[in-house]
Amino acid sequence: MRPGERHDEPGASSLRTVGVLGGMSPASTSHYYDGIVEGVTEARGGHTSAPVIVYSVNFAEVKDLIDADRWEAAGELLASRAQRLQAAGAEVVVLATNTMHRVADTIASGLAVPFVHIVDPTAAAIHEAGLDTVAVLGTETTMAGEFYHERFAAHGVETVVPDESARETVDRVIFEELVHGEVREASRHRLLAIVADLQEAGAEGVVLGCTELAMLLDHDDTDLPVVDTTSRHVSRAVQLCLGEAPLPGE
């Protein structure tokens, strides 16, 4: 082997293929792809690269259905796209968005391969941190919707959310700024003020329940433990790709 040449670890070909259902937004989808590939390469070394299939949907189609409150149709649309990932060879599927986990059951029910819900690895991280009650920041759908909080409750995690006015602020920052790649310092300060209010309401940590929020907030911005759903979801996808975690349902 020549100096500096990388050595491939045996067994790299046994990696599971991960399907990423993305496009909601493109920025978060890129984060998923990069994170999964980098995580597998770091674990295996050499020239190993994760087998990843990405289906990036037209976000405008999805948002039009959301705005019209046609969630069933949105679920059916995403389920059909997830099935294309499966047909292309995905052995496990992740949905690269928190908000659209409102239709996770519809997506998962249409697949013969496992679907990894974003709340499950996040709840595990919350327990590992010794937390019982967490604040949830995300889109209005995520913060106000029962689908997210019920999943946390099933894991024994209590959630608190901002009041209506603060939820509108967080939702606006996500859709008008972050999904377009804009990071504004003024918005960071607004969100930190909201986090401080939630801490007074009993939150012991804060969950970044939107795949773009990590662009704006991190561990250095608040004294509360920060649990990023995206990074936890990506880490679980890496473990599944490597065969280091059981598939959902096993």
Image (cartoon, rainbow, N blue to C red):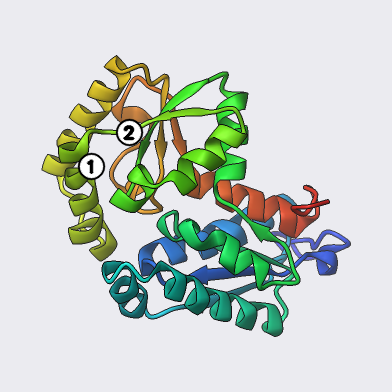
- In the rendering, which numbered label is found on residue 22? none
Residue at 51 percent of width and 46 percent of height:
231
The quadrant of the image that shows the N terminus is bottom right
Q: Position of residue 198 (x, y in %)?
A: 29, 24
Which one is in front, 75 or 45?
75
Q: Position of residue 48 (x, y in %)?
A: 72, 65
Task: Examine the rendered structure and indicate whether residue 142 appears above or below residue 18.
Answer: above
Task: Examine the rendered structure and indicate whether residue 69 appears above or below residue 213.
Answer: below
**Horizontal side, residue 226 vs residue 175: left or right:** right
Mark 2: amino acid:
Val
Q: Quadrant of residue 167?
A: top left
Q: Badge 1: how crowded within 10 Å, few (<14), some, or many (20+)? A: many
Count of numbered circles in the view: 2
For numbered disc 2, what is the local secondary structure? loop
Mark 1: amino acid:
Arg
Residue at 19 percent of width and 57 percent of height:
177
Note whether residue 110 is visible: yes
Residue at the disc numbered 2? 161
Residue at 54 percent of width and 56 percent of height:
35
Q: Position of residue 17 (x, y in %)?
A: 72, 69
Q: Position of residue 224 (x, y in %)?
A: 38, 22
Residue at the disc numbered 1? 167
For numbered disc 1, what is the local secondary structure? helix
**Horizontal side, residue 162 vs residue 11: left or right:** left
